[in-house]
Image (spheres, rainbow, N blue to C red):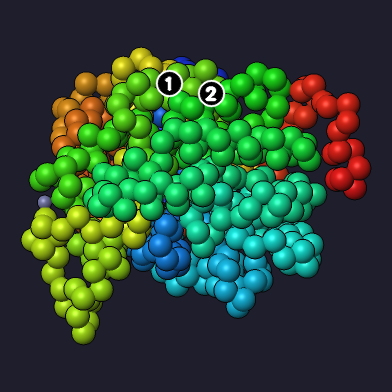
Amino acid sequence: MTTKFDLVILNGVVVTASDIGKFDIGIKGHTLTPSFSAEEIAGAEIVDAEGGMVMPGGIDGHVHLCQDLKTGPLGLGGECADNFETGSRSAVCGGTTTIITFATQTRADEDRSLLKVVEAYSARAEATGSYIDYGFHVIIVRDDEDVLETELPVLVEQWGITSCKLFMTYETMRLQDYQLLDVMLAALKHSITTMIHAENGEMIQWLTEKLESKGMMAPYYHALSRPQSVEGEAANRTIVLAELIESPILFVHVGSSASAAVIRAAQTRGYPVFAETCPQYLNLTWEDLKRFHSPTCFENSKMICSPPPGPDSSDQDSLYLGLHNGTFTIFSSDHCPFKYDDPHGKMVGILEHEPSMRGPSREDISFPELAHNKVGSFRMIPNGIPGVETRLPLLFTRGISTGRITPQKFVELTSTNPAKLYGLYPRKGAILPGSDADIVIWHPEGTLPPFTLENKHLHHNVDYTPYEGMKFNNWPRYTILRGKVMWANGVLLGKPYDGEYLKRGPNQLGKGVAHFKKDPRRVAAWVRE
Ligand code: URP
Ligand code: ZN
Ligand code: ZN
Ligand code: ZN
């Protein structure tokens, strides 16, 4: 007998970016049908949501997997602990059904070709498979005119890569203003969204040297090398540069109220600025950079990411407000996993600083005890923290449950807007007829006793979580990818090759350049031709 549906989700409170209400959902093959009669569900697999919230699957637009990060001091400088298999496994157990990861150009001449970089990166994904659907951004660290002119159109047409990330910091990756303009203009011509890591690299470098000259090298001082103005200045400069050529711009991992204020002001003028913030900026502070053992203990390197979290909860309040009032378009993890007890992970911060400790083979050394007596050098510590699995449950617990954001806003920030911004809507990010049946279902309110997170609960390949010991009051109960139940009641049911590569279209949130007051001397009129 052919059934009308393969899977039905009954008794859920369905939440979309605009609405909330009690609906049942039918799934045939990969796609959704939100309305049907009781007779039509004969033969279908049934998921009873028991009154829990049912949302479109999470889309995490900022995930570093399998990325070669050996880029040296003031850079990333370590080895990504998660590959596509382990990173996507972690994602799906936390309610995420789509990730967008970074294919990274380097300054080495053999990496000039973005197409070759993307092909090599795609082979990494294919080597292990991905539990969930995935797409790529490209990180561009050079402004080779010929490459930009000939390869960007191929990236868009053949690969569906419609976003690039540019760095203003990290010595080995950053672009100067001249180069930023070059790449932003080339991206604009091909309707590629420019994502910017806005921190003033020279200020950071100068402050780092000052701190080092005073012996202030412990992980905690990483935060002192990056005061608010480092982000605020770079955000402001980015908007000036973008406005020169009338290019929309997307700020990733915004970590401070200074930067949020600059972004908000531009948006208020009608300038098309999009912005992302991440869990670390809402849940960690400088106190966490002093949390372990003693304020100068190297173990605090576990918390290092750029930009750093703010000094106290006042920045968090501003950032929550930004989630609520639309300053932020998306909420992503910036999952950038480095192991702690690993010579290619956070320990690089000791080994590069004290080469004598390397010994004949770095692999032979066991670190934890040793590290407690060391401060290492924050300059050398790989930047980044894991968080792809905790992204949604953290925002649910601390955003929805506290009333700081509505369930609809949660869906907008974590699924619908990322889908629109990165050209995946309405295939992704929606509960509409014909959309992919990507769904996350939460425990009905009050049925999951609040619990304390431990790293052993998580499914990444990292030996710690920054959120160890935090209380959670909900967690995804089911994650469904294109109609397949991947995660149910704490059991992983999916497989590493369930995920598919996603070709994406352009930004669907609008260019918006019609609305801001243009300079009568505007150069964009001729420079863009
Ligand atoms: O510290 C961070 N954010 N590491 C990841 C790389 C990046 O800049 O996004
Ligand atoms: Zn970045
Ligand atoms: Zn990142
Ligand atoms: Zn210690």
Say whether marks 2 and 1 touch (CB < 8 Å).
Answer: yes
Is residue 280 shown above or below 339?
Answer: above
All told, the count of numbered labels is 2
> What percent of the width, then of the height, locates residue 427?
60, 42
Residue nearest the viewer, comparing 495 with 333: 333
What residue lies at 25% left-to-right and 73% top-to-bottom?
355
Which kind of residue does numbered mark 1 sit on?
Answer: Ser
Q: Residue most toward the top?
A: 403
Residue 261: which numbered mark, if any?
2
Residue nearest the viewer, comparing 271 with 413: 271
What residue lies at 45% left-to-right and 72% top-to-bottom?
127
Between disc 2 and disc 1, the foreground one is: 2
What residue lies at 60% left-to-right and 60% top-to-bottom?
141
Which kind of residue does numbered mark 2 sit on?
Answer: Ala
> What percent of the width, then of the height, locates residue 328?
53, 28
Q: Is 496 situated left or right of 186 in this image?
A: left
Q: Residue most toward the bottom?
A: 360
Judge the density around disc 1: few (<14), some (14-19), many (≥20) Cα neighbours within 10 Å.
some
What residue lies at 72% left-to-right and 65% top-to-bottom?
144
The residue tagged 1 is: 318
Tell which circle, 2 or 1, labels the residue nearer the N-terminal end.
Answer: 2
Judge the density around disc 2: few (<14), some (14-19), many (≥20) Cα neighbours within 10 Å.
some
Q: Quadrant of residue 371?
A: bottom left
